Each structure stands twice: as structure tokens, then as C-alpha cells.
């Protein structure tokens, strides 16, 4: 009598899995692909417009006071905007990571529209702002939209936010693998098959959507740093990589501590209800933009200009007739200060590419120095890109993303050993000097500033795995548990009690004890029921009796 019922439950569970994994992921990819593609097109126009505007002002210095007034007014508007919509503070990456882990809740339509408008305004005003961070947040909003509009459970919503984030970053870079790896390494910090499949489907759909839209509108489909040529490195070349990686990673450590220091200092600025602090990075960006065009925008043009095509001869637009080396040092310092001010203040703009630009610039300076010491000029391009990855790894602490990004953004797949050496040193230096991943640290500070989970305390909840639920037949580490929680005990259907590990397989009838810091036990139970299945009312009442 029970067999048809079990069969129907299995069919229903399979249909639910197909809906949550495939259909929702495709919808997320479509939504993210469309919105993020248009956002990046607008950002490209914004960078072009700001360069023309600053060139006009340089030709007519009488307009400089007007530029300063405009930037100050824009800063107050953006600062007020961020005060009312804190989800768009900074690049948005820490907040969307918190949402993917179930820690932060937000209204997707408010966050998406606000970040779209505010970050574009920053780009139009000439700030050294990248589009990649906002693209990731906008993609996460698209994932939240599909989960909410189709009334999915909390676990599915979290998966779609991560998938949308992957899609957003992949569209911004036209780098699908980088987008997927970043979501796994940053959003969930675990390599779950469920997260991988969901993200992969969304990324593929989003990239196809992006390419179709750009092709239809006459825009180039590809994106990579084509000016770089990688050559095989000898053992001597690898020694230069080791030295460069140590120097660049120390610069990454300095940036991290400077950002934390500036964040503390900006908290003391209360002018115009805190919005006044935004005047500092905005006016500084205006001054930097008048010095060099390489100080504006995300940094794509600067990184591309550093490529030598394998010749080792770096040729960039010099500043006021100075040498190439002086120009590189000035640009790196300007971009370093800009990133510190933007992150410290919380300007709604991306710092993903700007950080890469700092690393690449440092690599270019070191390449010139190493050539004077006898390094083969043919190693220059590779060393510049390696330094870019090292700086990113030290600050963000995402080494796998860094390695994949190097090859995917350049289209060069020759000799991966030097990249691995450089990235490993960058990660080790971060560990040695006890750096938290910067996005993790920013998320912790955001949670504290916004008083999220102030009444939370440690709770233990017991739930039973139901037949054909997400947990039935799955190992513990493959499931998306509530953030910061842990399965501390399992009692099998036969009554055996044990402490599980990540490889423990759960079965219907197992009772698990889950420990988590939460402000609402009922919300925690509802989330767990999404994973283990909600018991029937008859079964619940029978247990009470």
C-alpha cells in the first residue's frame, strides 16, 4: 500500500530538484546576463565620457573649481544614498556574500537599482571605480529575485544568490570559470556539488546571453588582456618571481592595514550625517584624474598598456614628460591611495579590477628594475600578470580564483608553475602576517555596523531526516547548512548515537542535532526543514503523545 506513495514522493522530489537546480538557475542566468551586460555597457560609456570631460577641463583650467564643486555635491548625494541603502556600501561583494550565506537579508529590487545607479554615477564622475564588484552584487540580486518571485525555500534562495553572483562576475570579465570559482571560494567557502552545478548552469546561461546581446548590438564579444605574451621561464626566471611575489605581497599587506585604519578614521567624520566623508575620496579622485588618465576607471586600459607582446619594452603615456618608471610609480601610488580611500569610506564602486591594476603596476615597476639586474626581457609580461595575481591573493585570500583568472583573462596557458609559485607565496604571506580575507573582514564590520543578529545566541535544534528530502542519502558536507552552524550529533534510526564528520551519510529516520548562533529558533528550524524535510502533522502529534 505504501509503495505508490513512496514512488510519488520520489517523483515529486526529483521534480523539485530539477526545478530548483536547472530551471531556476537558467532564469537566474538570463536575468543576470541581461542586466549585467547592460550595466557593463553603460560603465564603458561612463569611462569614455569621464576621460573626455577631464581632458576638456585640462584644456580649460578655469573649469577646475566647477569640477571640485560638482564632485563635492555628487559625494554628498552618493553618501546620503548609501546611508539609506547600506547594501550598496563599497563594492557590495561582502554584503552579497553575507546574503549567500544566509546572514544578511535584503530587498533585491532596491539593492539592484541602487547599486546600478550609484556605481555608474561614480564612474561618470571619474572615480577609479571598477564594474566587476557591482556586477557581482547585481547578479546576486538577480538570483534573489528568481528565488523570491518563485517562492522557493531559504536554501534554494541562497544557492541562487551564489549562482547569480557567479554569473554577474563571469559576465563582467567574460570569464566563466573565474566567476564560478570565485563563488565557490568566496561566497560559500566550500566546494559543494550542489553549488557547483547551480553556479555552472547560471554562468553558462549568462555568458551566452551576454554574447548574444553584445553581438546583436554591434559590441565586441571577447574580453581579455591581449597585449601580454607568456614565455617559458627558466629557474632563474622563477627566482625573480619569488622575489617579486614577496615584495608585492608585502604591498598587499600594507593596503589591507591602511584600509582598516582609514575605515576607523572615517567613522569619526559626522559632517552631513556621515555623508560628508565621501567628499574626500571624490575630490581626491578628481585631482588624480587631472594628473593622469590611468587614474580613472577600473584599470583595464592601464593593465592592457603594460603588455609588451613579449618584447619587455613597457610603453605607457608618460605624466608631464617624466620617464616610464616615474609614471608607473606615480600611477601605482595614486591607485593605491584611491583604493584605500574608496574601501575605507565605502564608496559604491568596484575595487576588484583596481586591485588587479595595482598588482600589475607593481609588477611593471619590478620588471624594469629586474631587467637592469639582468632579467630576460621576455619574462616581463608574465611577471606583470603574476604580480597582479599575487596582490589579489594576498588581500582577498582567494588563490584558486587568482590562478584561474591569470590564464582566463589573458588567454595564455603556457607554463603555470611560475603562477603557482607566486600565488602560493602571496597566500603564505597573508597567513604568516595573520590577515583575514578583506571581504570577510568587511562583512564582519558591516554586520556589526548594521546591528545584524544583535540578540543572537547559541542554540541547539533536533530535527529528523525525512524520506526523499534533500538530506536523505547525502553526506553532511554536501548540504548547504545555515551559516556558522554545525551538525554536532546524529542518532541513527536504529538508535546509534555518534559525532558525524563531513563524510557522514545521512539517511531517512536519522535525528540530527544542529548547533548554531541565531536570533530566531523558529527561523532556524524552518531552514533545517528545507534541508531534512518537514515532518507530517500526524507524525508530529504522534511523537508528542
Image: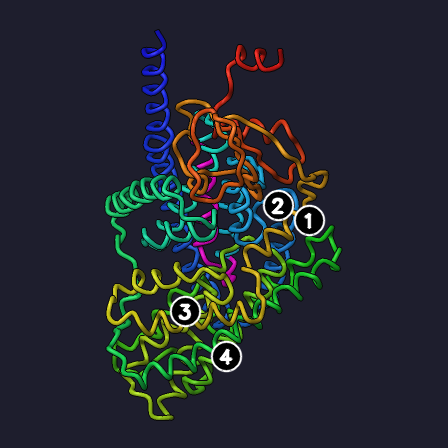
Please provide the residue range marked out in magenta. Answer: 125-146
Q: Is residue 217 left or right of residue 453?
A: left
State the residue position of label 2: 86
Marks 1/4 in contact by CB < 8 Å: the verdict is no
Badge 2 or badge 3: first in the primary sequence: 2
Screen quadrant of the C terminus? top right
Q: Is residue 403 left or right of residue 50?
A: left
Badge 2 or badge 1: first in the primary sequence: 2
Q: CA distance from mark 3 to mark 4?
A: 25 Å
**Mark identifier at residue 330:** 4
State the residue position of label 3: 423
- Residue at image x 35%, y 61%? 405
Marks 2/1 in contact by CB < 8 Å: the verdict is yes
Q: CA distance from mark 4 to mark 2?
A: 33 Å
Based on the picture, tell me whether residue 169 belongs to the magenta stretch: no
State the residue position of label 1: 449
Badge 4 or badge 2: first in the primary sequence: 2
* x and y percentages locating residue 163 in the rendered image: 40, 42
Q: CA distance from mark 2 to mark 1?
A: 10 Å
> Dot 4: what SS?
helix
> Dot 3: what SS?
helix
> Dot 2: what SS?
helix
Q: State whether residue 63 appears in this view.
A: no
Q: How is the protein colored in the picture?
A: rainbow
Badge 1 or badge 4: first in the primary sequence: 4
Q: State whether residue 99 appears in this view.
A: yes
Q: CA distance from mark 2 to mark 3?
A: 33 Å
Marks 3/1 in contact by CB < 8 Å: the verdict is no
Amino acid at each position: 500500500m505504501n509503495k505508490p506513495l513512496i514512488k510519488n514522493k520520489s517523483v515529486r522530489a526529483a521534480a523539485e530538484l530539477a526545478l530548483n537546480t536547472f530551471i531556476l538557475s537558467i532564469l537566474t542566468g538570463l536575468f543576470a546576463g541581461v542586466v549585467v551586460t547592460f550595466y557593463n555597457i553603460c560603465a564603458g560609456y561612463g569611462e569614455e565620457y569621464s576621460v573626455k570631460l577631464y581632458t576638456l577641463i585640462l584644456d580649460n583650467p578655469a573649469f577646475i573649481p566647477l569640477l571640485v564643486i560638482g564632485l563635492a555635491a555628487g559625494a554628498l548625494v552618493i553618501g546620503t544614498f548609501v546611508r539609506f541603502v547600506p547594501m550598496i556600501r563599497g563594492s557590495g561583494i561582502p554584503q552579497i556574500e553575507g546574503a549567500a550565506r544566509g546572514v544578511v537579508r535584503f530587498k533585491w529590487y532596491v539593492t539592484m537599482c541602487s547599486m546600478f545607479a550609484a556605481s555608474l554615477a561614480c564612474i561618470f564622475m571619474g572615480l577609479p571605480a571598477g564594474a566587476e564588484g557591482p556586477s557581482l552584487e547585481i547578479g546576486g540580486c538577480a538570483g534573489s529575485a528568481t528565488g523570491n518571485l518563485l517562492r522557493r525555500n531559504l536554501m534554494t534562495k541562497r544557492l541562487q544568490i551564489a549562482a547569480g553572483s557567479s554569473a554577474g562576475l563571469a559576465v563582467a570579465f567574460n570569464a566563466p570559470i573565474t566567476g564560478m570559482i570565485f563563488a565557490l571560494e568566496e561566497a560559500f567557502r566550500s566546494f559543494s556539488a550542489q553549488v557547483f552545478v547551480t553556479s555552472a548552469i547560471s554562468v553558462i546561461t549568462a555568458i551566452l546571453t551576454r554574447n548574444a546581446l553584445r553581438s546583436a548590438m554591434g559590441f565586441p564579444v571577447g574580453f581579455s588582456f591581449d597585449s601580454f605574451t607568456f614565455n617559458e621561464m627558466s629557474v632563474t626566471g622563477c627566482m625573480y618571481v619569488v622575489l617579486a611575489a614577496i615584495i608585492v605581497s608585502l604591498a598587499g599587506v600594507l593596503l589591507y592595514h591602511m584600509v582598516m585604519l582609514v575605515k576607523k578614521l572615517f567613522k569619526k567624520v559626522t559632517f552631513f550625517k556621515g555623508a560628508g566623508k565621501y567628499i574626500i575620496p571624490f575630490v581626491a579622485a578628481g585631482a588624480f584624474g587631472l594628473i593622469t588618465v590611468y587614474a580613472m576607471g577600473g584599470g583595464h586600459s592601464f593593465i592592457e598598456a603594460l603588455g609588451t607582446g613579449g618584447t619587455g619594452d613597457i610603453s605607457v603615456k608618460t605624466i608631464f614628460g617624466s620617464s616610464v618608471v616615474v609614471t608607473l610609480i606615480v600611477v601605482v601610488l595614486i591607485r593605491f591611495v584611491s583604493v584605500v580611500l574608496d574601501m575605507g569610506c565605502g564608496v559604491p564602486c568596484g575595487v576588484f579590477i583596481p586591485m588587479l591594476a595595482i598588482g600589475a603596476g607593481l609588477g611593471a615597476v619590478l620588471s624594469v628594475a629586474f631587467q637592469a639586474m639582468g632579467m630576460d626581457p621576455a619574462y616581463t609580461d608574465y611577471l606583470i600578470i603574476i604580480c597582479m595575481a599575487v596582490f589579489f591573493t594576498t588581500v582577498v585570500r582567494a588563490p584558486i580564483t587568482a590562478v584561474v583568472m591569470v590564464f582566463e583573462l589573458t588567454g595564455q596557458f603556457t607554463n603555470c608553475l611560475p603562477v603557482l609559485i607566486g600565488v602560493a607565496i602571496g597566500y603564505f604571506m597573508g597567513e604568516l602576517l595573520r590577515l583575514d580575507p578583506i571581504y570577510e573582514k568587511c562583512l564582519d564590520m558591516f554586520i556589526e555596523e548594521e546591528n545584524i543578529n544583535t540578540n543572537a545566541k547559541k542554540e541547539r535544534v533536533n530535527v529528523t531526516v525525512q524520506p526523499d528530502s534533500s538530506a536523505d542519502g547525502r553526506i553532511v558536507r554536501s548540504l548547504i547548512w545555515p551559516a556558522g552552524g554545525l551538525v554536532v550529533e546524529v542518532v541513527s534510526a536504529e538508535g546509534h548515537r555518534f559525532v558525524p564528520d563531513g563524510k557522514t551519510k545521512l539517511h531517512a529516520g536519522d535525528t540530527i542535532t544542529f548547533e548554531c548562533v541565531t536570533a530566531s529558533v523558529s527561523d532556524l528550524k524552518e531552514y533545517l526543514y528545507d534541508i531534512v524535510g518537514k515532518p507530517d502533522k500526524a507524525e508530529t502529534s504522534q511523537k508528542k503523545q
